[in-house]
Image (spheres, grey):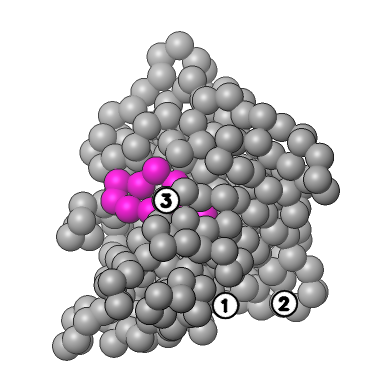
């Protein structure tokens, strides 16, 4: 499920936002985007084009605009292994080939339009006891009101990526406008160049304004000394006691954590965002875990000192990628949460 939101992540932040977030190591330009190669910088993503296919062949994802043949809905509870084999209830249901199409720069209209990551609270996983990779990421938030004007696609999520630039993102996502749905939904997404440029999402479930939701990714107690884990990615509606989940085996450690991200496409006015130019969304009970000593699955919670403006480390970095229209974007983080203003 796109950083400096030019014409460009995931998260599919993987593409221009399955996220795979892509920024410089100093966090000066993070972003989420994916494709058939490493996600790259914001500038590189903005230059990606595909002249041989029409815009109608591309769909919006929390990883950017991805060719529709490379975006796959799979049943909740399905899993994918190192060989890109998707299984459900023990049966193979899909074997994805590498995606031959790059992530495409978003189409710009005559009006200023945001297409990509708008803001995030993020941090590289600190080195504790010789380990700088995550084993779990969790957080809660509340579904906001619907935008006053419809036509955009919006993603709120937390998640993990392997590095900068990213090759994979895992992200439980709250989405609005996905596939033309005029309402909020939850889905679990993952993908990136590690999967040949393919992006996968679980069957979406409904969410409504005021519902409490949770995004949760964890290594299922399966991690080895290199940080390779079997991940569960779960998006849960706590109000309705429903969830949608996917499983994925990753042979790369996840070293980049996102406490909260706002990504959006086809935003031509502040009315395309929840609450207009005076909205905000808070990610609460944010928790990042990593290994404790030689037991790679005995978790220790990473203790943050809040925003990097404060003394001490580790800390969350508040990043506003911006874009036009400007709708009061601001990020504020503390040890266990972040608020995204828009």
Q: Is residue 60 visible?
A: no
Queried whether the magenta region covers residue 164, the answer comes back as yes
Residues tagged 1 and 2 counted as in contact (Cβ below 8 A): yes
Residue pictured at 26% horizontal, 35% vertical: 44
Where is residue 290 shown, x and y percent of the image? 42, 74
Where is residue 329 shown, x and y percent of the image? 34, 66
Residue pictured at 55% horizontal, 41% vertical: 82
Q: Name which of mark 1 and mark 2 comes first in the sequence.
A: 1
Examine the rendered structure and indicate whether residue 131 appears above or below residue 167.
below
Examine the rendered structure and indicate whether residue 136 appears above or below residue 151.
below
Residue pictured at 80% horizontal, 74% vertical: 240
Query: 131 or 123, which is in the foreground?
Result: 131
Q: CA distance from mark 3 to mark 1?
A: 26 Å
Residue 238, disc? 2
Relative horizontal placement of residue 58, taking residue 303 as reference (left or right): right
Examine the rendered structure and indicate whether residue 24 appears above or below residue 207.
above
Q: Name which of mark 2 and mark 3 comes first in the sequence.
A: 2
Queried whether the magenta region covers residue 126, the answer comes back as no
Q: Which residue is mark 1?
A: 140
Where is residue 205 shown, x and y percent of the image? 75, 58
Q: Secondary structure at mark 3?
A: loop
Q: CA distance from mark 2 to mark 3?
A: 30 Å
Please report the bounds of the magenta region as a residue range. 160-171
Q: Secondary structure at mark 2?
A: loop
Residues tagged 2 and 3 counted as in contact (Cβ below 8 A): no
Residue pictured at 57% horizontal, 77% vertical: 140
Q: CA distance from mark 1 to mark 2?
A: 9 Å
Q: Which part of the image, by quadrant, shows the C terminus?
A: bottom left
Q: Which residue is mark 3?
A: 252
Where is residue 89 shown, x and y percent of the image? 83, 48
- Front tag of 2 and 3: 3
């Amino acid at each position: 499920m796109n950083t400096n939101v030019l014409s460009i992540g995931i998260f599919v932040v993987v593409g221009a936002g399955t996220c795979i977030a892509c920024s410089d190591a100093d966090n000066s330009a993070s972003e989420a985007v994916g494709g058939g190669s490493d996600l790259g910088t914001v500038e590189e993503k903005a230059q990606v084009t595909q002249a041989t296919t029409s815009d109608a062949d591309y769909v919006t994802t929390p990883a950017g605009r991805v060719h529709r043949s490379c975006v796959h809905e799979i049943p909740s509870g399905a899993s994918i292994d190192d060989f890109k084999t998707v299984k459900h209830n023990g049966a193979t249901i899909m074997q994805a080939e590498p995606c031959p199409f790059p992530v495409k720069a978003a189409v710009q209209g005559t009006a200023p339009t945001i297409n990509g990551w708008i803001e995030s609270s993020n941090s590289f996983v600190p080195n504790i006891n010789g380990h700088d990779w995550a084993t779990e990421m969790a957080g809660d938030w509340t579904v906001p009101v619907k935008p006053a004007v419809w036509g955009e696609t919006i993603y709120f999520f937390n998640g993990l990526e392997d590095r900068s630039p990213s090759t994979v993102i895992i992200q439980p996502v709250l989405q609005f406008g996905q596939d033309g749905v005029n309402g909020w939904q939850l889905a679990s997404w993952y993908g990136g160049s590690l999967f040949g440029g393919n992006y996968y999402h679980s069957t979406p479930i409904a969410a409504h304004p005021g519902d409490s939701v949770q995004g949760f990714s964890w290594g299922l107690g399966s991690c080895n000394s290199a940080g390779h884990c079997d991940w569960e990615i779960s998006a849960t509606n706590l109000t309705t006691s429903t969830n949608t989940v996917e499983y994925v085996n990753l042979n790369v450690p996840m070293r980049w954590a996102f406490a909260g991200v706002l990504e959006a496409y086809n935003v031509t006015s502040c009315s395309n965002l929840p609450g207009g130019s005076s909205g905000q969304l808070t990610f609460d009970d944010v928790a990042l875990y990593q290994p404790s000593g030689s037991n790679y699955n005995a978790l220790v919670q990473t203790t943050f000192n809040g925003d990097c403006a404060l003394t001490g480390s580790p800390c969350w970095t508040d990043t506003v990628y911006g874009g036009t229209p400007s709708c009061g974007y601001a990020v504020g983080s503390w040890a266990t949460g972040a608020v995204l203003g828009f």
